[in-house]
């Protein structure tokens, strides 16, 4: 039997998923049902673009509900073990691009919570993969779609 995929996330990330699921099941699902009812009243369903769009939305909402339920069911909570000697899942890492780049800070989270604009990168990303297991002062080569870059780890929280 195939191993179930674990979704690594913080307690806060799990809470956000639970809130999203509640919203999808109560509010969004009801909105889509109302849109379908209204679109049906427009008549001939074979040429009814409002009806088709509402049905597409319904499929998306139901798919997302299933996806979120699966992520919650298979959530693996990242515990803060207090170890700041080595980069790990859940740590915030400060690094600078060499030779003279500015310092950047990213928190390494599971893919379910990653949001690069919020400074949260997935543990599956090339950056995180390159940093995990490394220590302050180490220089690391990160392979990115834009080419290799060298960074130095400045701090781990």
Image (tube, grey):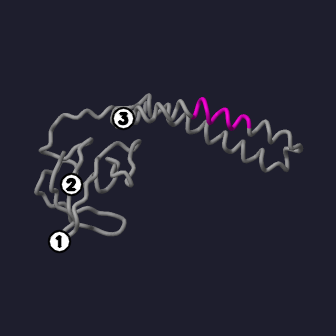
Q: Give residue 30's mark.
A: none
Q: Position of residue 39 (x, y in %)?
A: 80, 42
Residue under the image location 75 percent in, 46 percent down: 52
Mark pair 2, 1: CA separation: 15 Å
Within 10 Å of disc 3 (Cα), the crowding (few <14, some 14-19, many 20+) is few
Residue under the image location 73 percent in, 35 percent down: 34
Residue under the image location 83 percent in, 39 percent down: 40
Residue that badge 1 annotates? 99
Q: Earlier in the sequence, mark 3 or mark 2?
A: 3
Residue that badge 3 annotates? 12
Please report contact status of discs 2 and 1: CB closer than 8 Å, yes or no. no
Q: Position of residue 51 (x, y in %)?
A: 78, 44
Within 10 Å of disc 2 (Cα), the crowding (few <14, some 14-19, many 20+) is some
Residue that badge 2 annotates? 94
Q: Earlier in the sequence, mark 2 or mark 1?
A: 2
Q: Position of residue 105 (x, y in %)?
A: 25, 54
Judge whether residue 29 is colored magenta: yes
Mark pair 1, 3: CA separation: 36 Å
Q: Is residue 75 left or right of residue 61?
A: left
Instruction: Tell me the quarter of the image containing the C terminus.
Output: top left
Q: Which residues are magenta?
A: 24-34
Could you tell me which secondary element the residue under label 3 belongs to? Answer: helix
Q: Is residue 135 left or right of residue 119?
A: left
Q: Nearer the viewer, residue 93 or 142?
A: 93
Q: Earlier in the sequence, mark 1 or mark 3?
A: 3
Residue under the image location 80 percent in, 39 percent down: 38
């Amino acid at each position: 039997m195939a191993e179930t995929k674990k979704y690594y996330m913080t307690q806060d990330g799990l809470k956000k998923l639970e809130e999203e699921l509640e919203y999808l099941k109560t509010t969004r699902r009801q909105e889509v049902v109302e849109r379908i009812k209204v679109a049906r009243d427009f008549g001939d369903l074979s040429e009814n673009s409002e009806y088709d769009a509402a049905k597409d939305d319904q499929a998306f909402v139901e798919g997302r509900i299933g996806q979120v339920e699966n992520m919650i069911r298979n959530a693996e909570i990242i515990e803060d073990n207090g170890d700041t000697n080595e980069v790990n899942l859940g740590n915030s890492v400060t690094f600078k691009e060499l030779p003279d780049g500015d310092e950047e800070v990213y928190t390494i989270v599971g893919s379910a919570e990653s949001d690069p604009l919020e400074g949260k990168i997935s543990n599956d990303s090339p950056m995180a993969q390159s940093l995990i297991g490394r220590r302050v002062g180490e220089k690391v080569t990160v392979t990115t779609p834009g080419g290799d870059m060298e960074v130095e780890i400045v701090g781990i929280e």
